[in-house]
Amino acid sequence: MNSKDLYNAICKVDDDILEKSEAAAGMPKVKSKRLIFAAIAACLCLAIFNIWELRAEGMPVTDYEDGVTIPQMNASLSVNGLTDMIGFFLYQGRHYVQYDWINEEDDDVDLIGEYLGTATGSIDEWTLADGYVEFAGSVRGDFYAVKGYDPAFILCMKQSADVVSLYICNNGITLKYGSELFEDRFHLSGNLKSVQYESHDSWFNEREERYQMNSVNQIILDFIKSMDSAQFIPYEAVPSDEDRIEELYHLFFQMENGMTVHLRLYENGYIRCQGMWSLYIQVPEKIYNKLLNLLDTHAGSAMAETAGPDL
């Protein structure tokens, strides 16, 4: 059974639940989505529990005109037997969740910075709330700062000689403008190397029909500027249920340091950043339509040599 089968089997679970389970499926980046989808299916029930628990506590809770606050995770998962499927650990009171995997040899990058601590891997399905202490987590190993990035946002672990896993703190923060995520945290504009994209149908159904733009053109630059100036909107403020907006494309901003900023594009100018599940931004229609036309026509693009997925 794959994640889509499970998705259809349990009361037509909202698409955001399936999406959130991807971030919980701590596993390496591979050339096919099949392994990722298998992990999604394995931990989907846990993701559902997490989402319901967080929403029950009011996630997000602030008036978004003053910024959207994503509360600190309530990480007591002892009621569920799949806790060890989630890659996360605690450091300085923050929860870091597995975000992406990078092969440093393939990407010719060097991300690992200062050693900061060692995650104990002490949390499993039987751990009570008082076991969620400093350095505890479902993963074990040394973790480090990421060169050029704020350790309050992103850390990394070395999984093998070449493979590095990235962990982001996507909770316990308040964000108002897109620039606070894309520029202040990801350093997108000054680090952008190339752009790839794939339709949502291709991405979800494992067709791997990914395209790469020949250059970072003005339409992309204008789009990034519009995201930076847009205000974040909480998930609950965007149409849902029978009025749910359709997901159109996945956009992958590949950066010089080997990291990828993965965006999910919806109808009516709505955008979500992979890993920041409770937040949307909305960009102006004129700018958004220019981008969609570029993606629809594949103007200035060619089929990518590889179409490996990003978590």
Image: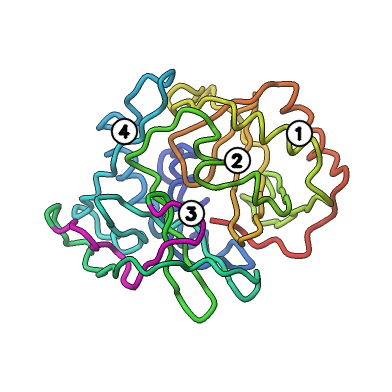
Residue 226, image x, y percentages: 65, 28
Which element type, helix, strand or loop, lies under badge 2?
strand
Q: Residues within 10 Å of mark 2 (few under 14, many from 20)?
A: many
Mark 2 — residue? 264
Q: Amino acid at mark 3?
A: Tyr
Indicate which label's residue lies in the foreground, 3 or 1.
Answer: 3
Q: Tag 4 or tag 2, which sits nearer the N-term? A: 4
Residue 149 image label: 3
Is residue 128 shown in magenta?
no
Q: Amino acid at mark 4?
A: Arg
Magenta region: 131-151
Disc 2 + disc 4, Cβ < 8 Å: no
Residue, x 48% and y 68% (percent of image)?
112
119 above or below 290?
below
How far, Cα to Cα, is label 1 from label 2? 12 Å
Q: Tag 4 or tag 3, which sits nearer the N-term? A: 4
Q: Amino acid at mark 2?
A: Arg
Residue, x 31% and y 71% (percent of image)?
140
Q: Tag 2 or tag 1, which sits nearer the N-term? A: 2
Q: Is residue 42 left or right of residue 122?
A: right
Mark 4 — residue? 55
Mark 1 — residue? 292
